[in-house]
Every structure is written in structure tokens, then in C-alpha cells.
Amino acid sequence: MSKEYQNYVNGKWTNAKSKAIRDIRDPGNGELVAAVPECQKEDIALAIDAAREAFDHGPWRKLTAQDRGKILFKIAEGIRAKSKDLAELEVRNCGKPLAEAEFDVADAANCFEFYGGLATKIHGETMQVPANSLSFVLREPIGVCGQIIPWNYPLLMAAWKLAPALAAGNTCVLKPSELTPLTALELGEILMRVELYPGVVNIVTGPGTGAGEELSANSKVDKVAFTGGTVTGRKVMTAATSNLKKISLELGGKNPNIVFANADLEAAIDGALFGAFANQGEVCSAGSRLLVEKSIHKKIVDGMLQKIPKIKLGHGLTSGVKMGPLISAAHREKVESYIKIGIEEGAKLVCGGKRPTGKEFASGNFLEPTIFDHVKPNMRIAREEIFGPVLSVISFETEEEAIRIANDTEYGLAAAVWTRDVNRAIRVVQQIRAGITWVNTYHPTFNELPWGGYKQSGIGRELGLYGIEEYLETKQVNINLDEAPIGWY
Ligand code: NDP
């Protein structure tokens, strides 16, 4: 039976002013999972008012950091207590395999715990200035934060946004993707149970056009944090100029995964497949460009082709499944259009490229893991973010050429290097223009480390100490220790 959700506003489940409802269907079999309000501007504005009131007049930001931290710990516990249900719901809403969803849910709990601990470590500093003055710096919350998240990691992205904002004492309005609002709404249930003060977090569902736009533009919002595509990120940034909001953007990538001949090739082959196909390739940091040294090119491609049959396609709740459906029929069509482009551009399709056949695939948005070989760096499939299970393999001959190709992109989110030569690894990492780099591994993500991109992959950083900085204002305080008049006039 499908569940009907309301908005979580001002500490209560509330009916939306907008009477429109959106059916949420399982992308793996088309079954109806839930119905959610399809809110527009007016409902977002009400949620913003609640967050404004909670920030300006509520107890949240006056709470001790210890107390805020304890509430975040309780949220982490609440997520863990419901982890099985949350993981299954995540699969039914966004399609990923269960093991990946379980990992995301555990990581979301860890994220609240990490920032719960960090709440008590926010501190300013004192400065020596050329005057008889006690001068110091205070860190304070920014205010009302509008947070817009995508469909590929719904609960985890909610955690990445809410946890640091709350630890710093802000209030929030979270808008999940209209395609994947369910685990964020279940998080609302947990927030109610830990008795978070009304209005501190508000979760409102609705489309980007309308709901998302209002959150970016409304002048009562002090900061907007967005994760999603670069095109939408640019729109959010433009709308945020209305009152010059603080802004952080985590956007797309066309990430190079560079394999040198002296790497552990077995490990590199594993890493190349995981980098490209984890979460169906619907990952901003996916290693969608595989740069391979010419002398081992054939070995790497053959090695990947040998392992591809192990990537079992199917509904994410089916045992042994390693790749689920894409998020929507429209998104699958977009990815397929790139496969067509790749063929037309003259790249060699060496596997995949089709929808799998069979009864179990008939009602889902499935697409085979796809590899293009002999891709040239100027082809569109090597330059544009496809955001699906499509890997482009590109050859290089020298370290300099690998670095040049790796950096020849408007993006700068992630990159990886596979080599046993530690000097080479460091040399390459130092020259790569990207915010996240891996050596002899792909994809590990830690709450402790900053996450974000160079160039058009974004502005600011999430996670770690850097993540909380994005939610803090900086205030200087000068206390004059000379009580006499300054005698200027
Ligand atoms: P979007 O970037 O459009 O969506 C991300 C979030 O922004 C969603 O909550 C969306 O709402 C919201 N949004 C959409 N339009 C606006 C707007 N004008 N103002 C404010 N918020 C808005 O991603 P798409 O789903 O359209 O995917 C398009 C492409 O973006 C993908 O193919 C992929 O290349 C990239 N992408 C990158 C992600 C990343 O992690 N870096 C994540 C998702 C997508 P709603 O879903 O309700 O429209």
C-alpha cells in the first residue's frame, strides 16, 4: 500500500496549500510507492517563514553547543534505529542496489554524529592588534538556510546539508528532489521524535521550477546550499543574487580516472568499473573518463569486459543485484541519447548500450553498463556529464599527456591515479585541478574530509571542518581597553 506524505513544517506534518499531489513510483518496476505534495512557491514561503521565526526568536541558536550536539547524536541514533526501513525505501525510491542504500543510511547517521561532535568545537580566535584593545573573532550561524538536494543520494544528501547547518545553529528549509523525497520525509519523522524545536528544520516537497526557485530567490533566506547539475546550479546562483545570499554549490563532474602501466592492474580494473558503475553511474564524482596508458590499454579493456557480466542488473531489492534502474524514463532517454552520440562520433562501443531484455526489466528504467573504447578527448561523450552507466576509455602515452587530458574539462570535481610509483602519484595529484583526488582507489568518501569541486564543479566545500565553515558567519569584536576619549576632534 502506498503512503501519503505531508510537508514537515514548523515541527508538524502539514497539508500543503497546493492541492497538487505527485505519485512516487519505484523506478525498478513502476509500482506506486507513495504520494507527496507537489508544492509551489506559497508552501515554500510558509516553510521559510517558520525557519525565519525559529532562527530570529526561537531557542535553537541560543542553545549551548553541547545541547545542539546531543540532538544531532539523537538524530543519528534515530536513523540507525530505522536503518533497514530507510534503506529499503531508498531502493524503492531511487533504484540503487540495497547494499549501496544500506551504506548510504549508515553514512547519513555517521554524518549527524560527526557534526554533533563538531558542534562543541566551533571556535573563534583572539588577535594581537596595534592598539590597546582586546580583539577577537566570533563564529555565528548564518541564519535561514535553503537546501536543495538531488535524487541520486537522497538521504545522504539531506544529512550532508542538515547536519553541519544544525551544528552551527542555523535553521533550514530542505527541498528534496521531486523524484526522491521519501527518505528525507522519513527523516522528518525522526526529527519529530527527537523533539527538535519547531521550525528548525522544515522539509517541503515540490518541483525545482516553483519550489526550488522560491528557495533560491526568497529574501528571507540567508544562505542557499545546492547539489545538482551545473546548469541548475547556475540558475540557483542567479536567483540567490536577489539578496546576495551566501551560497554553496556542489555540481557535476567529468572525472578522470588515470591508470599508468606500473599500477596494480587487477585493482585498477576493479576501481575503473566501480568508479564508473556504482550507483548506476549516477554520481557526480563518477570516474566516467578512464585514461589508460597506451601499453596496457588492451589489458585494461579486456579485463573490464571479463568482469562486466558480474554486474548483475535488476531491482535493487533482488539479492545479488549490483546495478539498479536509472532514476526515470526521461533520464534513461537522456543517457541513451549520449550512447547514440558516442556511436555517431566514431567511438567504439565494446559493451552495453542497450536496455536489457526479459520480464524482470520490462517495467523499470534499466540500461546495460556501457563502455566506449577509443574515445577521443574532444568527443562529447568525453566532455559532457552523462550521469549514467557510460564509461569512455581514452589512451595516453606520457604523464604530461595524461594530466593535460585530465584537466581539459570545464569541471574539476574528482580524479584518481593508479600507479605504484609514489612520486608519480603525488606529482599527478598536485597538477590535477580537482577538489577530490584518490590514489589507487576510487570513490571512498569520508565525513572527515572536504568534498567539493574546482572550476564549474561548484563553490565551497561540504563535509569535514570545511563543511561547517560554509554555515558560519565571522564577526570581529574590538574592546577598547583605553577608556579615555580618542581626542580626534
Ligand atoms: P537538477 O540539478 O535539476 O536537480 C537538483 C535539485 O535542484 C532538485 O531538487 C531539483 O528539483 C532542483 N531544481 C531543479 N531546477 C531548479 C531551479 N530552477 N531552481 C532551484 N532548484 C531547482 O538535476 P536533474 O534532476 O534535472 O538532473 C539533470 C542533470 O544534473 C543530470 O543529468 C546530471 O548531469 C546532473 N546532476 C548532478 C548531480 C550531482 O550530484 N552533482 C545530482 C543530480 C543531477 P526537482 O528534482 O524537483 O526538479
Image: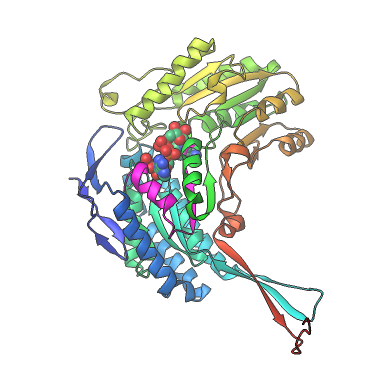
Q: Does 159 appear above or below 139? A: above
Q: Is residue 282 visible?
A: no
Answer with left or right where residue 141 lies relative to residue 174: right
Q: Farthest residue in the front direction?
A: 489
The quarter holding residue 328 reads top left
Q: Does 117 appear above or below 456? A: below
Q: Does 428 appear above or below 401? A: below
Q: Position of residue 489 (x, y in %)?
A: 77, 82
Q: Which of the pair 149/444 is nearer the observer? A: 149
Q: Position of residue 221 (x, y in %)?
A: 44, 58
Answer with left or right where residue 189 lies relative to residue 276: left
Q: Is residue 445 visible?
A: yes
Residue 402 inside the magenta-drawn segment: no
Q: Position of residue 384 (x, y in %)?
A: 53, 26
Disc tally is 0
Which residue: 57% across, 50% down? Answer: 446
Screen quadrant of the N terminus: top left
Q: Farthest residue in the left direction?
A: 1
Which residue: 59% across, 14% down? Answer: 374
Q: Position of residue 425 (x, y in %)?
A: 73, 35
Which residue: 42% across, 32% down? Answer: 322
Q: Farthest residue in the bottom direction?
A: 484
Q: Which of the pair 57/27 is nearer the observer? A: 57
**Colour convention of the picture:** rainbow
Which residue: 43% across, 71% down? Answer: 56
The residues colored magenta run 206-229
User: Quarter for ligand 1?
Assistant: top left
Q: Which of the pair 182/226 is nearer the observer? A: 226
